[in-house]
Amino acid sequence: MRAPYRVEVKVVEQRGKCDFGHRVGDVARFDGNGLEGKICWHSLCSMMYKIHGFLYGADYPWLEDKEIASHPCPDIKNPVLYEIRRVKNG
């Protein structure tokens, strides 16, 4: 089954030293079948429920923009902040 959306995860802020090497502007793309780009395993595990929900049209009522969520890296000493964006498949 093809996901009705695709999801882009972009690094929008990075402080300290990210051991994975993430830098502002890095992007990973998900289409429901795979991943294009690279993303830290620890961050991916912590945000997977948002990515999966966005792929299949979930509505998160606390989001101001229903197509964009932010997500912090689990490393509190060297934080990376991600923007998770849902895009309709056309």
Image: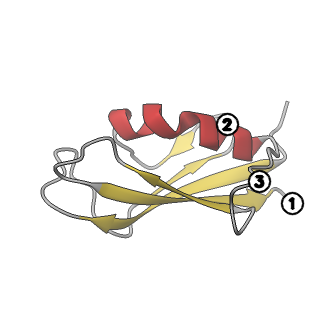
The colour scheme used here is secondary structure
Residue drawn at x 77%, y 53% is 61
Label 3 to label 2: alpha-carbon separation: 16 Å
Q: Is residue 79 left or right of residue 68?
A: left
Residue drawn at x 82%, y 56% is 89
Residue drawn at x 58%, y 57% is 8
Q: Which mark is residue 90?
A: 1
Which is nearer the eye, 21 or 18?
18
- Kind of residue at badge 1: Gly
Front tag of 1 and 3: 3
Which is nearer the eye, 26 or 78?
78
| Callouts 3 and 2 close, C-beta under 8 Å | no
- Kind of residue at badge 2: His
**Residue 54 percent location from the top left of the image:** 72, 47
Q: Residue furthest front?
A: 62
Q: Say which quadrant the N terminus sits in.
A: top right
| Callouts 1 and 3 close, C-beta under 8 Å | no
Q: Which mark is residue 61?
A: 3
- Kind of residue at badge 3: Pro
Q: What is the secondary structure assignment of the residue under circle 1?
A: loop
Front tag of 3 and 2: 3
Which is nearer the eye, 71 or 18?
71
Q: Is tag 1's residue or tag 3's residue first in the polypeptide sequence?
A: 3
Residue drawn at x 67%, y 34% is 33
Q: Is residue 70 left or right of residue 14?
A: right
User: 10 Å neighbourhood of mark 3: few (<14), some, or many (≥20)?
Assistant: few
**Residue 28 percent location from the top left of the image:** 49, 52
Q: Is residue 85 left or right of residue 88?
A: left
Label 1 to label 3: alpha-carbon separation: 24 Å
Q: Say which quadrant the C terminus sits in.
A: bottom right
Residue under label 2, please give it. Answer: 52
